[in-house]
Amino acid sequence: MSLLEEIHDSQFDEKVLKSFLPVVLDCMSPECIICKTMDERLKEVARTSQGLANFFKINVNTNKVWQEFVVKVVPTLLYFKNGNLVSRGENFPDKEEIVRRLNELRLIKT
């Protein structure tokens, strides 16, 4: 598996909702310049967080599941634990913020 695997609507339940590990889902568009920067940022965090969380991205142009979570801007990061959306980031967080949220996810009981 890649550090930031792209998933599709048909994979969402299995990869995100049924994940044993916390999940960071990047709702993105390949045309978005900021999304490309976020992609690199997430890959860096994923490299240092292997085994602690799963990192996925979903293209908002070709999928619809992101609409269930009221995503209004891209990139938006959705943080899941035990199949529940527990946090979101719409403010183009830096690596430290992403790591902080991951650490919080491991402490949250769901």
Image (cartoon, grey):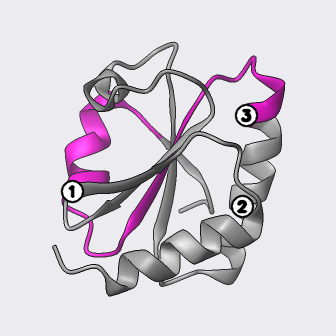
Q: In which quarter of the image is residue 44?
A: bottom right
In this rendering, the answer to whether 85 lies above or below 35 is: below
Q: In terms of sequence position, does the residue under pointer 3 or pointer 1 come before the other?
A: 3
36 vs 90, nearest the viewer: 90
Instruction: Calculate the distance from the C-alpha at mark 2 to the C-alpha at mark 3.
Output: 12 Å
> Label 2, on which residue?
43
Disc 2 residue crowd, few under 14, some 14–19, many 20+, Cα 10 Å:
some
Residue at image location 34% in from the left, 86% down from the top: 107
In this rendering, the answer to whether 105 lies above or below 3 is: below
Viewer-nearest of discs 2 and 3: 3
- Looking at the rendered image, the quarter that the C terminus falls into is bottom left
Viewer-nearest of discs 1 and 2: 1
Q: What element carries label 2?
A: helix
> Label 3, on which residue?
35
* Amino acid under disc 1: Asn
Q: Is mark 1 on a helix, strand or loop?
A: strand
Where is residue 93? Give x, y as percent. 70, 53
Where is residue 43? Give x, y as percent. 72, 61
In this rendering, the answer to whether 21 lies above or below 77 is: below
Q: In terms of sequence position, does the residue under pointer 2 or pointer 3 come before the other?
A: 3
Whether residue 55 is visible, yes or no, is yes
Residue 86 part of the magenta segment: no
* Amino acid under disc 2: Lys
Instruction: Calculate the distance from the C-alpha at mark 3 to the C-alpha at mark 1.
Output: 24 Å
Residue at image location 57% in from the left, 81% down from the top: 50
Cβ atoms at labels 2 and 3 below 8 Å apart = no
Cβ atoms at labels 1 and 2 below 8 Å apart = no
Q: What element carries label 3?
A: helix
Where is residue 21? Give x, y as percent. 34, 75
Magenta segment range? 7-35
